[in-house]
Amino acid sequence: MRLLLGEKGVPYEPVRESPWLRRDEFLDMNPAGQTPVMVNSDRPEALPLIDSMAICEYIEETVEKSAMISGTAANRAEIRRLVTWFDTHFYRDITAPLLRERMEKRLVHRAAPDAKLLREAMKAAVAHLDYVDYLLDNRAWLAGSTMSLADLAAAAQISVADYLGGIDWKSHEQAKRWYVGMKSRPSFRPLLAERMEVISPPADYEKLDL
Amino acid sequence: MRLLLGEKGVPYEPVRESPWLRRDEFLDMNPAGQTPVMVNSDRPEALPLIDSMAICEYIEETVEKSAMISGTAANRAEIRRLVTWFDTHFYRDITAPLLRERMEKRLVHRAAPDAKLLREAMKAAVAHLDYVDYLLDNRAWLAGSTMSLADLAAAAQISVADYLGGIDWKSHEQAKRWYVGMKSRPSFRPLLAERMEVISPPADYEKLDL
């Protein structure tokens, strides 16, 4: 969502929310208790916007510049399929276990990560990068001939996994080159500059040549 | 997806797939290994359409009749938020545990359901029906003044939960009246007529007055 706003040149102000605290004010905004939630400062009386994909569709519909869900209906279906692929499958198999083992356990439970779960997440990351390589064998960008929301969704998930040391770029030349291109975009800079509270990223995390 | 095709009057032919068997031919169509997948018989050479929401957006974009993601960008965002709410949260808290405890355990593991998990799913269903009541206190339909994909997504999840005995309509008058209206739609009839292999639905399942 933030990458999409960045690509479209829409200014935004991130507000930190820790959904696990389940603050009443936040649950009043979103009964599902999940981030992201977006409030349009030009229309503060409007309902808050909720759910990453619903928000991205809203941004795409209201800001014409740099269309990211474009092309024929079939192209758009392929873009949306891949966004769900990364937001759901990549997140479930890689990002979520890495966040749980490396961050939540340390911050909340003061416990060590489970080495077996970390290994499984990193193994899943290899399979996902293989799939990225496969897509890029046939296409200039993940969903087709132009950059799309699929590239933004994939790069967002991969950057969190990379921060948490879950990505091994070895033997993924195609994916690596694509990811370096994504990292070099101005929309990506504010995200790369952020740090989690207790964990530092690997040395190459922000570098534009891996 | 089937309700949307029904509402729009697009004929379709369901093909049964058991995703847990992970057939190679199916994984070749959808590497995520999940249903639904839709093949357009007019364009068999095209990529298969994958992911419930991506397919519904495709149907909505290509078939004008009976728009179900309509209105302003804000209305459309509210529709999409609720579709995700039912497809993700209702599914995770209610439909998925009911399917696991009542169907998968019996069919695959020949085991009895876990009474505690069943009680939790039914308790979650009460909370979700409370939320449906709350939405209908303020709106004619779940996402606003007209019927939308949110109503179809909600009714689809609720009908599976109802089939599996997970819904207690007591003290949910608003939700019940809305659901009876959904059940009476022609798009719903083929779904209500279907039966799972080993489980019969409750006596009222198909009835149009509860």
Image (cartoon, coloured by chain):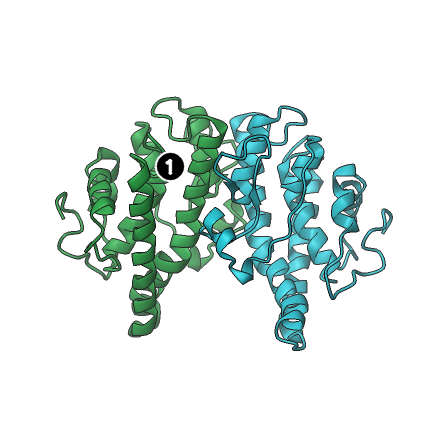
Chain colours: A green, B cyan
Q: Is residue A7 left or right of residue B139?
A: left
Percent position (x, y) of residue A71?
42, 26
Percent position (x, y) of residue A14?
33, 41
Furthest residue toward top = A64
What residue sits right under mark 1 in the picture?
Answer: A143
Query: In the picture shown, does residue B142 fall above or below B202?
Result: above
**Residue at the spot x=38%, y=30% of the render?**
A68
**Residue at the spot x=45%, y=38% of the render?**
A80
Kindly tell me whether residue A114 is visible in this rendering: no
Kindly tell me whether residue A58 is visible in this rendering: yes
Residue A203, by quadrant, is bottom left
Residue A209, by quadrant, is top left
Instruction: Please give the chain letter of the residue carrying mark 1.
Output: A
Percent position (x, y) of residue A146?
33, 29
Query: In the picture shown, does residue B9 fall above or below A111?
Result: above
Q: Is residue A191 left or right of residue A75?
A: left
SS for callout 1: loop
Q: Nearer the viewer, residue B176 or B166?
A: B166
**Residue at the spot x=61%, y=66% of the render?**
B100
Mark 1: which amino acid?
A: Ala
Q: Nearer the viewer, residue B82 or A91?
A: A91
Query: In the picture shown, does residue B70 fall above or below B85?
Result: above
Label tally: 1
Q: Is residue A52 left or right of residue B194?
A: left
